[in-house]
Image (cartoon, helix red, strand yellow):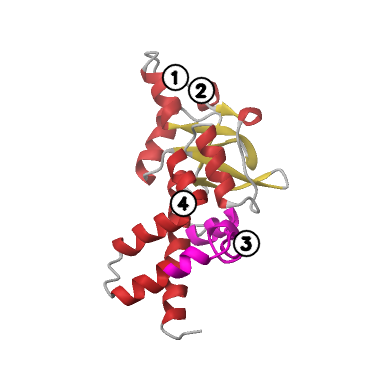
Amino acid sequence: MQGVIQAVRSHGNVLKYMVLQRIHIRESTVQACLLSHFKFVSSARLEEHGFESTTIVDILKAKGKSDDGSWLWCTTDDTVYDAVKSMTQHNVGALVVVKPGEQNSLAGIITERDYLRKIIVQGRSSKSTKVGDIMTEENKLITVTPDTKVLKAMQLMTDNRIRHIPVINDKQMIGMVSIGDVVRAVVSEHREELNRLNAYIQGGY
């Protein structure tokens, strides 16, 4: 993942060229103009119009409130078995943990990794163990806000070796994003930037 971040921040031209090849822009004249344009795009312009302007709230809006993983939760009193069953049913790797009767009060997070390390490896029973016994507690969580830049979130997740990060606003839980959400946002921004440049070359501006 460090390689992805370095490529995004320091080797934008190479990454853009790879994306161009991937989406099969075959006309050599268009490729030449695009690559020439990339060479002289300033970092300030990239930050203004590219992926560095995307924030976590943009990802949450794209996911939608009903999207699996955007706001799935369990309580500290639920069994680990029920929590893992919910993750499996919704095809997600983590659940937000809240206190019973307090859906917006973040108590922690439980992930597939917690299940493997604290239940399977230790030979414990998932049906008799409470989520609160194995979750990562709220005071140990790495979190972001809706205004956090996507690249900052990616860096936090990479540095701390985590794949899910809760989104907090005014001390209340409003959602969660995964490393997959972040990567898709970066790829989407690159695609949109390529479309803008292609329109510029074709006379769209």
Q: How far apart are the two marked residues, 4 and 2, measured between alpha carbons? A: 41 Å
10 Å neighbourhood of mark 1: few (<14), some, or many (≥20)? Answer: some
Residue 146 drawn above or below residue 199: above
Q: How far apart are the two marked residues, 3 and 2, measured between alpha carbons? A: 45 Å
Residue 29 drawn above or below residue 112: below
**Pointer 3 or 2: first along the chain:** 3
Residue 28 drawn above or below residue 153: below
Q: How far apart are the two marked residues, 4 and 1, measured between alpha carbons? A: 40 Å
Percent position (x, y) of residue 3? 43, 41
Q: Amino acid at mark 2?
A: Ile
Disc marking residue 11: 4
Q: Amino acid at mark 4?
A: His
- Callout 4: SS: loop
Disc marking residue 134: 2
Q: Which residue is mark 1?
A: 118
Q: How far apart are the two marked residues, 1 and 2, measured between alpha carbons? A: 6 Å
Apparent side of residue 142 relative to residue 14 in the rendered image (left or right): right
